[in-house]
Amino acid sequence: MHRLAFLALIAACAPSTQTGRPNSLPTTATEPVELMVAATTDQHGRLRGWDYYLGAANSKHSLARAATIVDSLRAAAPGRVLLVDAGDFLQGNPLTYVAARLDPGAAHPVIAAMNAMMYDAAAIGNHEFNYGIPVLGAAIGQARFPLLAANVYRPNGDRAYPASTLVKRSGITVGIIGATTPGSAVWDRDKLQGKLQFRDIVPEVRAAVRNVRARGADVVIVTIHSGLNEPASYDTIATGLPSENVSARLAREVEGIDLINYGHSHRQMADTIIGTTLLIQAKNWAESVAVAHLKVEPAGSRWRVTSRRGELIATAGRVESPSVLAATQRAHEATVAYSTAEIGSTPVAWRADSARVADAPITDFVLEVQRRTANAQLASTAAFSLEASLDAGPITVAEVARLYPYENTLKAIRISGKQLREYLEYSARYFGTVGTSDDPVNSKVPGYNFDIVAGASYTVDVSRPVGSRITRLEFSNRPIADSDSFTMALNNYRQSGGGGYAMLGGAPVVYDGTVEIRQLLIDEVRKRGTINPDDYHSRNWDLVPGGAIGPALAGMLANPFERSSRTAPSTSRGRRIRILATNDFHGALESRADSRGVVRGGAVALAASIQRASRDCQADCALVLLDGGDMYQGTLPSNLAFGRPVIQLYNMLGYSAAALGNHEFDWGIDTLKARMREARYPFLGANVRFADGSDVPWIPNDTLIERNGIRIGIIGLASVLTPATTRAVNVKGLRFDDPAPIVGELARGLRARGAEAVIVVAHDGAFCDRTGEASCEGEIVAFLSKLDEKIDAVVSGHTHSLISSRVKGTPLVQARSSGTALGVIDLQVGGEATISVRDVLPDSLVKLPRVDSLVRSAVAAVASRVDQSVAMIAEAMPRDGEQYALGNLIADAQRRAGKADVSVVNNGGIRTGLKAGNATYGKLYEIQPFANTLHRLTVRGRDLRAYVERLLERGEPRYHFSGIGIAYSPSEPQGRRVQSLTQGKSAPIDPARNYTVVMNDFLATGGEGLELARQASRDELLEMNDLDALIGYLRQLPQPVRSPPVDRLVVRP
């Protein structure tokens, strides 16, 4: 069903009076079935459209509104809808507090609502443990659906909670697996230590997937309380706990998962595909419902998912489900009564709006209650909400609950003066450094992790670098020494190291309270009756310089971690930038099967992926489509038209800019200029200069664009390796400079011109671990490591690798090559970013007719040549590793074509493998698309040996040879690695004799920084290119053609 028609149907369906899960309907195993999975996460007690803190209606979110969406889905697709949740539903607002603490014997309202909606399963979230294991156990007993946590165990090794469940829909068996973040072991250590153990999510889910598949699951869904790939908020090394946010890793590393519904990070994601796994995340507080559409088709006696897509449906403004309202009415009334109860009064208003930049009485109220209760010298707390207030007049429970919204208990520890300084320095990282490119507030640090301390006097100087900002630290008017000792009251979350405060590890506990801090505050107001700021406030800390305060306040309002419902002031309509990134397309207009037979990429599928990723970028979002270079050189349909079809494609898709790749130069500068004139987006190369250092006027450095009211600066970079990776003649007169100082200057200029974000698109890359997230090394990493100026994001290319990482905090992405993946960076203006790389799989996408027509025309134009049969190949010759049979075959072809003694072939000129069967002209063209002309050089034996030595200096040889045998030792010093060099298999190369050597013009003219032509007594340009040589050779060989031996290089110790 078309998405718009589907949403219209949802809107038209009236809410039912009975929210239910219809019985599974039978179906024949001959027709495809579309299953729908509705998903919620991080409800935090937002069951109804009522704000208990404000005592007012709220139309933006509620689970009761989500219920009407689920009802409509079930009406539209009877028997084909599943409903799951990813955790954090038992804690979060006054309603859940009343249910857990004041009325624990009654039916839990959250469970009652979820029972009414007939959930199929839910993951256990970390906040499910906030009220203790017994409260969670009671909720599990009431739930008519399983609460799952595959990675939680008891100390004896038994599972604490079920790992999975099986359900049926339309005759299809669906396995649902749940897991939860291990961080609960830190955050609720007091309640869980010695009772529960939290293991690594990934191996536990892997085992659970095997289990449900063995039990007959046709479809596997994982609902997981773990973010996508954000850094852990706790010290994984000090705690020994596994990672906190692993949903992306789960999709990459565990086979057999069709859908992951994830939560914990309070973001939303309509559909991300990693491998063949769809990932979705609904917005927290039931602001949206995520819906996954899984097309399931018969596969023998079983079923399999053949396509998948996701979408988000907002709950705002929808009618609330009568059944959910009825199920929660009693609890709602009890909560309203509790939260509106007057507990005291105050003659003046107290405000928290500036509590993080100035010593505020409302924060001191919390600190002094803690300090006095624990009889401690010091106390610490965060200003959790900048909207908290105690208005003049009566004080209600709701006001105190807003001031302290968490279920933390009070502790006190003994710390040294050194620990106190480290504590305050760590807290002060919340601010950027004044006078630098830093934002006023560090968007990666939530406000609840900026702590304020009472009892000591100190100054935070944000003009100084992080780690040296506490310029004054005193107790009782004397400087604090590292060896001094203090008692400090704080909450249990922080005492356990929550928020990364690892310096508190091992600090002795001297007070251990069981009453929640919020209740201590309520009791304080009740006891005093009337409270005044002077009873608590003592100015003991300040933030300098004074000019930092205003920008910091503005930055806090824009910080995405804030729990506030306030709308930050905005100078632009959209405050989020979605960057869609491709690179190294290499003219890959048609989809291709990879080494495992999975069809990937192609222009049609890539365009559909871009369109789908664009759907999530609407009114509040600015979309930017960028390419990391090497756009059009590489396939026959593109090359025979000198790249024009790719330019047409990119114009059609609306690219904003592209980096200048090395292969953009392959057909010379005149052709490059022609393609640049045709493109409706700039090719950027800020570091390309004339040989004298002057700017190249026809290559733009940067561009400033505006999307949805946001001004975005884009700087483009060519690889500094370009002269060594294209023909030298193609870049004659140009030089490619170190980009770091150039980018810094350009970024400052773009910001001065009004850019709110600056993005670099660079044809330089790196290689990371197999997740693309860690252990990244390469030119783009080195560039970012040297860069002093702030850059908001980087799109890279050139290495054809997977990168989804950060370098010095800067988001960095590369999406493999040939349109097989799409990089996505969601960037909050002045805030944090999320990074993902989505696989492009044509079978799960809907074709765009315009793009399909363009591709068909380009392919048809070369069809007669593409399909010409050249030879039959007996067995596949893959391009794997550095030494392979195909490379030797090509080297033999060039030596024979050039009638030479020796040939040398660089691996960079071999672009893909050769499959068994009919080798057509088109398939061979993809192996050698560059049409490099062959040279025959005449050199002395000693120069040939020296050249081979240089080839072996660079690690494992990336070259193939014909006509010579080489034995070498990589452990020997450079220049002495060649142990023997023979013509054929036995005759040593004579240093004084002349030999003829064939190589392509790229190598002959100094490509890869190696040049033999200068030592040649003769340099002959042959009237053929590398592809013609290969075709001629294959036609001469006995059919079918078999692989030549690989062992031409002998490695000795």
Image (cartoon, rainbow, N blue to C red):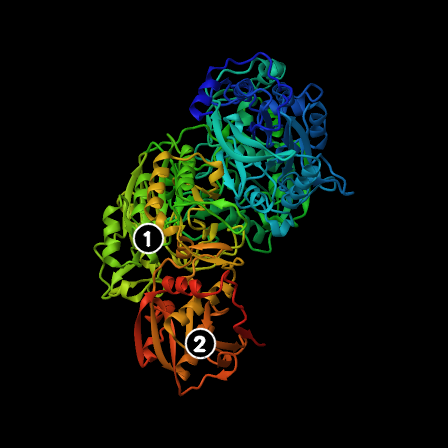
To which quarter of the image does residue 605 belong?
Answer: top left
Percent position of residue 83, x then y = 59, 26
Q: Residue drawn at (50%, 50%), measured in percent from left and top? A: 594
Percent position of residue 915, x then y = 50, 55
Disc 2 residue crowd, few under 14, some 14–19, many 20+, Cα 10 Å:
many
Percent position of residue 87, x then y = 60, 32
How far apart are the alpha carbons under marks 2 and 1?
A: 32 Å
Q: Secondary structure at mark 2?
A: helix
Disc 1 residue crowd, few under 14, some 14–19, many 20+, Cα 10 Å:
many
Q: Which residue is mark 1?
A: 639
Q: Residue drawn at (76%, 43%), measured in percent from left and top? A: 157
Q: Which residue is mark 2?
A: 948
Q: Tag 1 or tag 2, which sits nearer the N-term?
A: 1
- Residue furthest to the bottom: 992
Q: Is residue 171 visible?
A: yes
Give me the disc on residue 290. Answer: none
Percent position of residue 538, x then y = 50, 37
Query: Looking at the picture, which amino acid does disc 2 mark?
Result: Val
- Residue furthest to the top: 17
Query: Looking at the picture, which amino acid does disc 1 mark?
Result: Asn
Q: Residue drawn at (33%, 71%), measured in percent from left and top? A: 935
Q: Does residue 54 lie above or below 838 as drawn?
A: above
Left/right of residue 195 with respect to residue 38 in the rendered view:
right
